[in-house]
Amino acid sequence: MTKYIVRRLLQAIPLLLLISLILFVLMQNATDPLATMGGRTPTKPEDRARLTRQLGLDKPIYIQYLYWLIGNDWAKTDLDGDGVAETYGTRHGVLRGDFGTSIVQTGRPVTEVIGERLPNTLILMLTSEVIIVFGALLVGVFSALRQYSFFDNLLTGILFVGYSMPIFFIALSTMYIFSVNFKRWGLPYLPTVGMFDPKVGETPAQIILHMILPVFSISFISFAAYSRYIRSTMLEVLGQDYIRTARSKGLPKREITFIHALKNASLPIVTVVGLDLPLLLGGAVVTERIFAWPGMGRLFIDGIDRGDTPVVMGILMMIAVSVVVFQILTDIVYAWLDPRIRFD
Amino acid sequence: MKHLKSVLFMMVIAALLLAACGGGSAPAEGTEVAGGEEATQAPGAEGGEEGGNKTATFIFTQEFDNLNPLYTNQWFTAITYQMWSCYAWTYDDQNAPVPNLVTELPSTENGGISEDGRTLTFKLRDDIVWSDGTPITADDFVFTYEMTMDPNNTVASQSPYDEMESVVAADPQTVVVTFNEPFAPWAATLWKGIIPKHVLQPVFEAEGNLNAAEYNRAPTVGCGPFNFAEWEAGSFARFVANENYWLGRPKLDEIFIRFVPDDASQIAALQNGEGDLGTFIAYSDIPALEEAGVQMFTVFSGYNEGLYLNLGEKGHPALKDQGVRQALAYALDRESLVNDLLLGRTGVAATYWDNTPFVDPSVAPYPYDPAKANELLDAAGWTDSNGDGTRDKDGVELVLKYGTTTREIRKEIQAVFQQQLLEVGVGTELINAENFFDGYAEGGPAATGSLDIFEYSTTANFPDPHTSEWFCDQIPTDEAPDGSNWQAVCDTDLEALFTTESSQVDAAAREATFHQISKHIFDQAYWIGIYWDPDIWAVNSRLTNVKLSGATPFYNIMEWDLAE
């Protein structure tokens, strides 16, 4: 198993390099960070020329990628615009653990920018994922055990309503119902935006209160996919011979369902969850925007909007690395779920 | 079924919390909301003020990128400088300058502006202090200039400091600025945010630049009526009253700025009172906000939506004829458009400078007169000779490429105008470009001249009327791709007028020149106004004494108060 993991990690290195190169090139063609710089008027030509030079954006793209990868502390840059490169760079490059500094938040290390957003996203996304997975397991198993029953049809119906609605619609309509209208009607109401009320402070109670609507929105639309998946794999497993054998032996129904059937049925589910988990790090772009949740999704979109290549690259590489790691973890869980699987 | 139990358990907790919150809806009672234990952990309450704390919450749809005035161009950051940083002078709600750090604005009368118009002398008040008690002196002004121009600092803009020959502290209360050439728009561009030398000089000496200075994110020493307290990324920033403010302590104790990127969420937060102030409100959201008791403020900040007509080589040949250009203006029913699409909340724009003193008083928008438009087009020789519904001349169809951004209101205007222009035999091809604002080098459609008429609004130096958009050498080319004259109008009479105003130091004479300029552009119909595009602010009615200026919105924020 150790050998397998080491091999997989080594294989990941060229893959990550290739991914980083592709993303870097794509990012260069996305947005010009100096177009308006967040202002209401275009950046003045002289300032644009100066900043392009100071930030090294005038260098050819392969040089910029090289600087990003291995740093520029060995190369000189022309800061004063006299045409002579005189100052050594200060970047160490990703390979030496330096992800650079944000262009938008001038001079701030990318790791710091991402670091302050990541926990917020994890709180939101992990809670949603836990609710989705456990809820979908419940619904999926229940529906499989009582296939075509009234409850199966009802749940399937509700879930597909959620599945077919765009998330911004659910998010905004729940906000208007439970925040704006509930307040108007004098009922207990939920807060509209943010992770906590700054006047009260970042207390657990505040965070839970502010999480209700965004978690509901994220969960509601993803519920159907998971639960349908679980329902169909469960149905397949429940129809197999060994389940019938277990039943005829007189094993308790609960044991058959949750030990014999679910463990085997969960193999494909683990694959799906394993693929989804690293993406949680990226946050929920639409939900975070609507509920003003200070997470990664907003950071990512802001970064794309303003052409903040170092920050966007940092986020994308973090996700790429975690996809690789979670793939390996998924394989390990496979071996545990199904002892027939061997990696050596 | 233990999963079901845990889900139920969580739902019960959620319901309890929900009920607890509803119990205390008034923000001032916030500490009671979550009940006992949690409230005492609140980090936001560390100020230790008692229940009478006057706190206001603003909603910003963009988060600050950098709070150091040198390092950002961002509008949402700049408007906070009247809270915690300082301009040498601000502008009131009539856009008249209000001296802040200086005793008065330099003029030729008070000797502050030299004969040749190149040298400006600023006299500072002697009672101005940083929030830590250190006096603000001419050295801070010189330091601000030096840091802006230092090649090691990646500041957002060097304008207008790069036009200066020197900045000298003649004595602690006197700053003397000498420009290379007379620089008319100085009042609207100079000394917008002074940085404290005693705080930042040591940082600069240690690091060699200010690019990563802690001050950029936590400017703990300021010079406004409020002090910066904290900024939680993605979430909020907090400012508290500055006890050392020389014009007296502000009436509010605390201001929170919450970052809410989504427009619809901003409206919801304003409606249910989670925010006391928000801006860039769409006209269609105004009725719902007014119904919720929110006051609306219409503030002119120099933006007038209009059509630029491309007179360059790639533009449609018909547009080179003054009669055709005027015909377009007569063909568009802008009065109805303002009433229907913009709910009558604004007015028809006649010139680029509407709602400022720089418009010739005789100028009024072209009336809606399709008959006149037809007459002018016939006279210019554009007739529908082949009966296809659009006019033509010498085999060229009068079909104009009409481009703008992807903004919803602009698309709606395009649709209305397409109909109205067709009624006088002018065809249009509508284009909505994501990259509308891209420059010539990036291949932006307007900058490269591939549109015949294009719609947007801009202002260069509000409240100063100066713009370089109409100079011949600003027409973008391969050699000079950064030019801002996208409409490619090269009119020597007009250019001469702009050259004159650029160096006129006498305010009245300059205003007279601008009357000529606005009249000339109007008569030539180089630019066809559509509507005034003011900033719409929403302010909760519990916030009192609020006045908003177009150039420096929060100029009187020290007088804002809360009605209980």
Image (cartoon, rainbow, N blue to C red):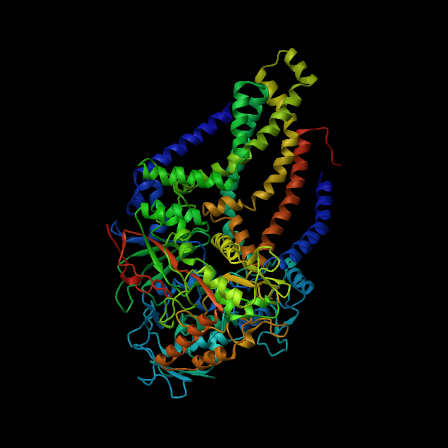
Q: Position of residue A21 (x, y in %)?
A: 68, 56
Left or right relative to B521: residue B256: left
Judging depth in this view, the residue of B531 and B71 nearest the camera is: B531
Q: Residue at x 31, y 77 (%)?
A: B104
Q: Position of residue B131 (x, y in %)?
A: 33, 67
Judging depth in this view, the residue of B296 and A29 nearest the camera is: B296
From this view, report whether residue B70 is shown above or below residue A192.
Answer: below
Left or right relative to A243: residue B511: left
Q: Position of residue B23 (x, y in %)?
A: 30, 37
Farthest-out residue, bottom: B115
Q: Position of residue A235 (x, y in %)?
A: 63, 22
Count of marks placed on residues:
0
Left or right relative to B7: residue A11: right
Q: Residue at x 55, y 52 (%)?
A: A300
- The picture quadrant where one finds residue B220 is bottom left
Judging depth in this view, the residue of B461 and B457 nearest the camera is: B457
From this view, report whether residue B122 is shown above or below residue A124.
Answer: below
Farthest-out residue, right: A344
- The picture quadrant where one finds residue B122 is bottom left
Res. B44 in view:
yes
Left or right relative to B219: residue A247: right
Res. B306 in view:
no
Judging depth in this view, the residue of B280 and B11 nearest the camera is: B280
